[in-house]
Image: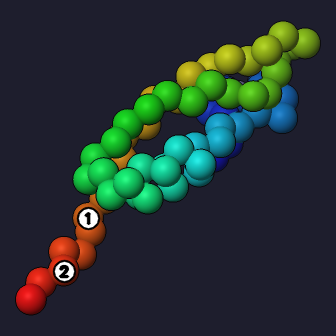
Amino acid sequence: MPCSYSSCDNGGYDVTQEILRGLASRTPRFEGECACRGSCGGECCSRVLRYVATATYRSPEA
Ligand SMILES: [Zn+2]
């Protein structure tokens, strides 16, 4: 997921791991924060992305 800040260099968020973790634990709704790992103007961007994810799981029906 790219950084939304236009002058951010090499920025982006890595939420994949956390989302996968949430899916693995079958949490119907999970949220978190992820800091940007890019830099802008030689300084760390450190923009924080907040995300909320909802997931629907197939329940084992008899
Ligand atoms: Zn950034």
Give the crowd class for mark 1: few <14, some 14-19, many >=20 residues within 10 Å: few
Q: Secondary structure at mark 1?
A: loop
Q: Quick one: SS at disc 2?
A: loop
Task: Give the residue at x 68% y 17%.
Answer: 46
**Is 52 located above or below residue 6 in the figure?**
below
Residue 3 in the image: x percent, y percent?
A: 66, 34
Among the 4 quarters of the image, the one containing residue 43: top right
Position above or below: 62 against 26 = below
Marks 2/1: CA distance? 13 Å
Which residue lies most toward the left here? 62
Residue 26 position, x and y percent, is 33, 58
Three-letter amino acid code of the residue under disc 1: Thr
Using residue 52 as the reference point, say whether residue 37 is left or right of it.
Answer: right
Residue 55 appears in the picture as rendered: yes
Label 2 crowd (10 A; few <14 / some 14-19 / many >=20): few
Q: Determine which of the numbered discs, if any, sits on residue 56 in the image.
A: 1
Where does the C terminus fall, quadrant-wise? bottom left
Please indicate whether residue 40 sits to the left or right of residue 5 in the image. right
Outermost bottom residue: 62
Q: Nearer the viewer, residue 45 or 33?
A: 33
Instruction: Give how far across and how far down residue 36 sits, in percent.
Output: 68, 27
> At label 2, which amino acid type do we have?
Pro
Q: Are marks 2 and 1 in contact (CB under 8 Å)?
A: no
Q: Residue at x 26, y 68 (%)?
A: 57
Residue 54 in sight: no
**Residue at screen point 79% across, 14% down:** 44
Judge from the rendering whether residue 30 lies leftward or rightward of residue 10; answer left or right. left
Residue, disc 2: 60
Along the line of sight, the residue nearer the viewer: 45 or 32:
32
Quadrant of the picture in which ligand 1 is shown: top right
How is the model colour-coded?
A: rainbow
